[in-house]
Image (spheres, rainbow, N blue to C red):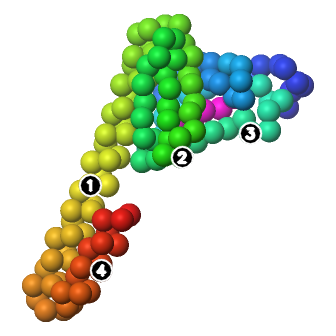
């Protein structure tokens, strides 16, 4: 453990980047980590209770670059800004987040399509009625 205001020093893993991210109002040192299903932002300054934020790629509605910041917006309209002066690194991180979002969305689309095909097969075999088909189809589409 360390005292208030002291920065944690640690070796970065291959999927991690040092950056500044907004926490409350001001930017603070942070580490950005890419995981299979989510993006994690760890604020180095331990004075903040909520020093870890996770953004699941399938919950991110928009990612954009605005001046020196990558802005992540989730489906609840909350925003997270990640500041970095290095434009190349900024572009690399933006591309990585965008790719993860697209991959996650494609996976979700594929599974929905698969479920709809299976449902159609059940209807064609007579295993479910037309009314059941319509109801189950709507449940799948509402996911």
Task: Answer above or below: position of 114 versus 55.
Answer: below
Observer-nearest residue: 131 or 124? 131
Q: Are marks 4 and 2 in contact (CB under 8 Å)?
A: no
Circle nearer the viewer, 2 or 3: 2
**Can you see residue 121?**
yes
Residue 93 falls in image quadrant: top left
Instruction: Determine whether, in the image, residue 78 is placed left or right of residue 116.
Output: right
Asked if residue 66 lies in the magenta stretch, the reply is no
Task: Answer above or below: position of 17 versus 35.
Answer: above
Q: State the image coordinates of residue 8 (x, y, percent, origin top left).
A: 75, 23
Q: State the image coordinates of residue 85 (x, y, percent, origin top left).
A: 53, 7
Mark drawn on residue 109: 1
Say few, some or many: other residues with alpha carbon within 10 Å of mark 3 (under 14 / 14 to 19 / 20 or more).
few
Mark drawn on residue 76: 2
The Cα–Cα distance between marks 3 and 1, rounded to whole angstroms, is 33 Å
Query: Furthest-right residue in view?
Result: 3
Task: Answer above or below: position of 143 versus 93.
Answer: below
Task: Answer above or below: position of 97 versus 26.
Answer: below
Q: State the image coordinates of residue 40 (x, y, percent, origin top left).
A: 57, 37
The Cα–Cα distance between marks 4 and 2, rounded to whole angstroms, is 27 Å
Q: Write the residue at 42% across / 25% down.
A: 64
């Amino acid at each position: 453990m360390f005292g208030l205001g002291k920065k944690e020093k640690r070796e970065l893993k291959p999927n991690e980047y040092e950056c500044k991210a907004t926490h409350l109002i001001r930017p603070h040192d942070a580490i950005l980590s890419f995981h299979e299903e989510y993006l994690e932002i760890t604020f180095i300054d331990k004075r903040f209770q909520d020093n870890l934020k996770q953004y699941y790629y399938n919950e991110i509605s928009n990612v954009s670059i605005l001046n020196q910041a990558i802005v992540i917006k989730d489906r609840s309209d909350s925003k997270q800004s990640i500041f970095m002066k290095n434009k190349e690194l900024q572009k690399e991180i933006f591309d990585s987040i965008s790719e993860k979002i697209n991959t996650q969305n494609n996976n979700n689309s594929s599974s929905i399509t698969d479920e709809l095909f299976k449902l159609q097969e059940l209807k064609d075999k007579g295993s479910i009625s037309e009314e059941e088909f319509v109801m189950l189809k709507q449940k799948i589409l509402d996911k």
